[in-house]
Amino acid sequence: MADLNVTIDRAATISRQVATLLDRRLRSASARYATRMQAATRDLAARPPRNPFEVGQDAWRYAIDATQRTLLFWDTLRQRGNDWIAHERAGKPPLLHYAWEVLADARSFARPCNYALLRIVPPHDITLDERLRPFIIIDPRAGHGPGIGGFKKDSEVGVALRAGHAVYFVIFHPDPEPGQTLADVVDAEAEFVRIVAARHPGSPKPVLVGNCQGGWAVMMLAASRPDIAGPCVINGAPISYWAGNDGENPMRYLGGLAGGAWPALLASDLGAGKFDGAHLVRNFEYLNPANTLWEKYYHLWSAVDTEPPRFLEFERWWGGFYLFNDQEIRWIVNNLFVGNKLSVGDARLGPGRFFDLKSIKSPIIVFASLGDNITPPQQAFNWIGDLYSSTEEIKANGQTIVGLLHEDVGHLGIFVSGQVANREHAQIIELLKHIQQLPPGLYGMDIKERPRRDGSVEYDVAIVERTLEDLRRMQKYDRVDEKPFEAVAALSELTERAYELLARPIVRQLTPEWVAKMLRELHPLRAQRWAISDHNLQVAALAPAAAMARAWRQPRSDANALLPVERFASEAISAWLDLYRDLRDAAAEGAFFQVYGNLLSLEVADQQRAIRRASRFDPRSVPAVRQVLDSAEQAGAIEGFVRIGLLVAKAGSGRRMLSSMERVRELMAPAHLLDGVSEDEFRSLMHEETIIVEFEADRAKRALPGILRSAAERRHAHDLLDGIAAHHRLDERQQALVGELRRLLPLSRRGLPASRGMRAPAATKKSAAPRAVRRSRRVKKTG
């Protein structure tokens, strides 16, 4: 009886908490609506009074202008419909700004899939540098077609080409191959990387760029084939799907409110085994009804003389709907959207094919935005906290992760905004030039603008060392609100099995291919396009009427008396739709936590956090780490120089400027000392020395006199310290450390003067190749 009373009390507590949350959300939504309407009313009332005669003239001019605008508006929608039909008949080719050629088509592979590899043909005024890393851009397969990464001149493709990099683009065709699975897709993408690497034998490994849903595809590829993956750039990509904050990210509740994954199975069965990507696009539009139903159309109508080209260009991509096989969408929903298995290592594509993101040894750059309500920063970054219990564990594992956070750009702006391309994406490319100088760890990328005299902008980029605690500050409740999603995942398994047993056989029998095709054609997002096109005889008169309106165009002036009324009405409609959205999202959020947010799941979360704190990972317990620490004194000159640089960096604030990193590798290890040392071997050297400096800093320092013994090596160490002091702003701790290192490494008794330039130490047996390089080569030889 006592247990029953406790259960009742807990249920009442949850109800009160949900009621409080709902009340707070409703009050906030009402306040935002009232504020917007008050501002719009003030703007309307601020207009000076006009005499009736002038108002009458303005009304007549406004009526003519509004009629012409309306004709041109509907004619633009007609052109959108014609473009959509033409794009469908052309086979939905990728919408890239740059010319391209097909290098490999995975439909001809042993395990075929609907993917292909393109080479972007550089314009005549761009010269590529074959020594630079090639870029491979993987666009999201999230309902739309490929092309968003190279949609405009100022895009990811454009900034990479202008920086001299060869660029390749992974696309997909509208229809999947029969029996195609995501395992086939991952294998095809791995083959594409091999092809690109073979085309550039003199350059480092290719950069893998994943946009949105292409981000988890890149992470899976890099985890399954870490030997071929270069640096991974993840833009607006959800990896931890349960993450987010209440009142900000309503899309994460859709799976729970729908009862799990079974609606995706139903949609696939109604498509005769194919899932229509238009359903995913409609979910995106569902997030912002004000923009979907009113704002984008009002913007077109109000600027109809100049806006149609931009509107039609974007709608051509937005209206390209692609299909998935039912096996593909089922895996995506179960493992990502609902199951959230990738970040914790439970996602697999087949027997023995698990994806351990810890196995990715290449640097990872994560770009997200605080203004993104489709992939909030929590979903982009929380996988790091799922994988690692401490920043020290990241360093011990040898991973270098750099995070970049935009203040306000929306989800699509991450990929299509020219300003973002020229600022963030261009600086990411600049970072990749120096990525080897970063030892393993977690970093933040800070971009500061500095105006020039000619009006252009110059960017100062700093890399700042971060900790996992910094990431946790993005969460309101220390991720406790993610626990109810585990109940969603459990319920999803039950509802999915029930659907398969009770309804799926019937639905499949009642949905032949011709019915599935008809349902796809009647989808609202398709119907609104083909219904307003030249194929509809009822709109046939739009073209000549719009031509007449253009010929006799009489736009109203900005001083027209009715223009403020128009803008007030538009603001009122937009504010009302935003209020509807806020009330809808608040009700959905309240229902979600009422159903799934019981106190039991919160207690489990508390227990898991307690276990996690009690069993904090000790990196020194890893055999590989112990092996490196045991060999701290068994190092050569190159390790010693790298160690000096890491010791000085560790003593500072952790802030590294890209402009100063330009000379880091030159100062620490001149190029002629690293002849024959590959990129992977150098990163392995940095990993091992980072472990020694991070966990045994005093021991690493005391070992330097035994490592750098000859006069030439010590002279080189003094030159290195001089170079660091000359090109970096050292704080007091760093200056004190530099002095201590000079005393630890005295020059010969005769007081050999320091050389004016950095010179290589005398060739010695122990400095011929770094420890990590010798170990790597032994492994390759014995392997």
Image (cartoon, rainbow, N blue to C red):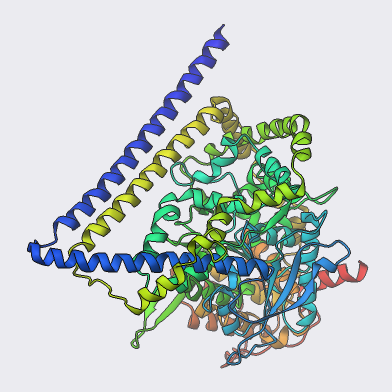
Nearer-the-camera pick, 705 or 724: 724
| One can see residue 50 in this view | no
Please say if 158 is above or below 236.
Answer: below
Report x, y in % for residue 119: 70, 79
| One can see residue 435 in this view | yes
Please say if 733 is above or below 8.
Answer: below
Report x, y in % for residue 553: 31, 76
> Which residue shows up at 40% across the image and 52% down it?
290
Counting labels gives 0
Taking the image as shown, residue 682 lies to the left or right of residue 149, namely right
Residue lying farthest right? 782
Taking the image as shown, residue 413 lies to the left or right of residue 516, namely left
Please say if 99 is above or below 428.
Answer: below
Nearer-the-camera pick, 556 or 183: 556
User: On the rendered image, what quadrant is the C terminus found in?
Assistant: bottom right
> Which residue shows up at 67% across the image and 42% down it?
339
Nearer-the-camera pick, 11 or 505: 505
> Which residue shows up at 71% across the image and 88% down it?
672
Report x, y in % for residue 368: 52, 60
